[in-house]
């Protein structure tokens, strides 16, 4: 069985159905990018994996465990599945190192000294160890997003969900964040990303999933989907992306 499995997933907000029968899978160590216009359901789909949103039909499995529906052990799920959001969501009253260490201390029972040491090791990896004692508002947007990624990694997740993590950044800061994701992909981290960075998606992903109005219109390897899309809507979307200079 695949590491993440979506079986006929439906999500509604009242009368508005935003996910309409989603079926696909993510293998262990695979990088899958969700693409599509704003409002197509990408972010909602990610939030459903992490039980931030309930689904109304179907089921989602992570490592054979059903993670949708009543009775889900949310703490156990979130120890296995990390998530990084568009907004950095760092605690403003805590230093960078404290932001990273708090999760392992509170949720994993790691001793504070060990958690702080691991935080410093992770910050060294993303070239931010010299900012360990800074507060979030003393960092650039790119630095804050790198800290947010490191905070998720500190929980030692088996899969990482990344929701438009560069959308709130100035263009010159995007590269430093995407470089971290490239390194994680090279290290074999299982990742599911929603992104508008098409060139990056083409480079880093094993599979592209194109969403349109809550449905998967088509999916496949980047070479197939970008160079030889089957659906007219996919062709039109990619044409707009090319014309905007984003591919």
Image (tube, grey):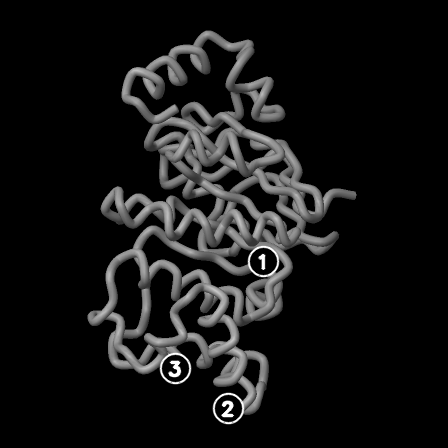
- Considering depth in this image, is 222 or 27 the residue closer to the camera? 222
Return the x and y of residue 123 as percentages of the image width and height.
Answer: 45, 71
Quadrant (top left, top right, bottom left, bottom right) of the N terminus = top right
Q: CA distance from mark 3 to mark 1?
A: 33 Å
**Residue at the image position 51 percent from the left and 19 percent from the top:** 226
Say whether marks 3 and 2 touch (CB < 8 Å): no
Mark 1 crowd level (few <14, some 14–19, many ≥20, 10 Å Cα): few
Q: Earlier in the sequence, mark 3 or mark 2?
A: 3
From the image, state whether disc 3 or disc 1 is nearer to you: 3
Q: Earlier in the sequence, mark 3 or mark 1?
A: 1
Secondary structure under the numbered disc 1 in the rendered image:
loop
Say whether marks 3 and 1 touch (CB < 8 Å): no
The residue that mark 3 highlights is 98
Q: Is residue 7 above or below residue 96?
A: above
Return the x and y of residue 87 as percentages of the image width and height.
Answer: 30, 56
Q: Earlier in the sequence, mark 1 or mark 2?
A: 1
- Left or right, 133 with reference to 58: left
- Left or right, 92 with reference to 7: left
Mark 2 crowd level (few <14, some 14–19, many ≥20, 10 Å Cα): some
Return the x and y of residue 36 as percentages of the image width and height.
Answer: 41, 27
- Considering depth in this image, is 170 or 5 the residue closer to the camera? 170
Quadrant (top left, top right, bottom left, bottom right) of the C terminus = top left
| The label number, if any, that marks residue 112 in the structure image | 2
Residue ranking furthest to the left? 137
The residue that mark 1 highlights is 70
Q: CA distance from mark 3 to mark 2?
A: 10 Å
């Amino acid at each position: 069985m695949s590491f993440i499995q979506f079986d006929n997933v439906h999500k509604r907000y009242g009368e508005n159905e935003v996910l309409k029968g989603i079926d696909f899978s993510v293998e262990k160590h695979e990088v899958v990018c969700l693409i599509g216009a704003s409002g197509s359901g990408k972010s909602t789909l990610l939030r459903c994996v992490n039980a931030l949103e309930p689904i109304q039909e179907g089921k989602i499995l992570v490592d054979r465990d059903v993670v949708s529906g009543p009775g889900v052990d949310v703490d156990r799920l979130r120890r296995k599945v990390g998530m990084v959001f568009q907004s950095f969501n760092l605690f403003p009253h805590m230093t960078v190192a404290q932001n990273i260490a708090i999760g392992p201390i509170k949720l994993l029972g790691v001793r504070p000294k060990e958690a702080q040491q691991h935080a410093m090791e992770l910050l060294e990896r993303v070239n931010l160890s010299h900012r360990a004692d800074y507060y979030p508002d003393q960092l650039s947007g790119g630095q804050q997003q790198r800290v947010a990624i490191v905070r998720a990694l500190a929980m030692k997740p088996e899969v990482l969900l990344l929701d438009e993590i560069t959308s709130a950044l100035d263009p010159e800061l995007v590269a430093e964040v995407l470089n971290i994701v490239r390194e994680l992909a090279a290290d074999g981290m299982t990742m599911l990303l929603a992104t508008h960075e098409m060139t990056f998606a083409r480079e880093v992903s094993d599979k592209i999933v194109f969403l349109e109005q809550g449905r998967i219109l088509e999916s496949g390897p980047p070479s197939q989907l970008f160079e030889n899309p089957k659906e007219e809507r996919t062709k039109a979307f990619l044409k707009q992306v090319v014309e905007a200079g984003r591919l």
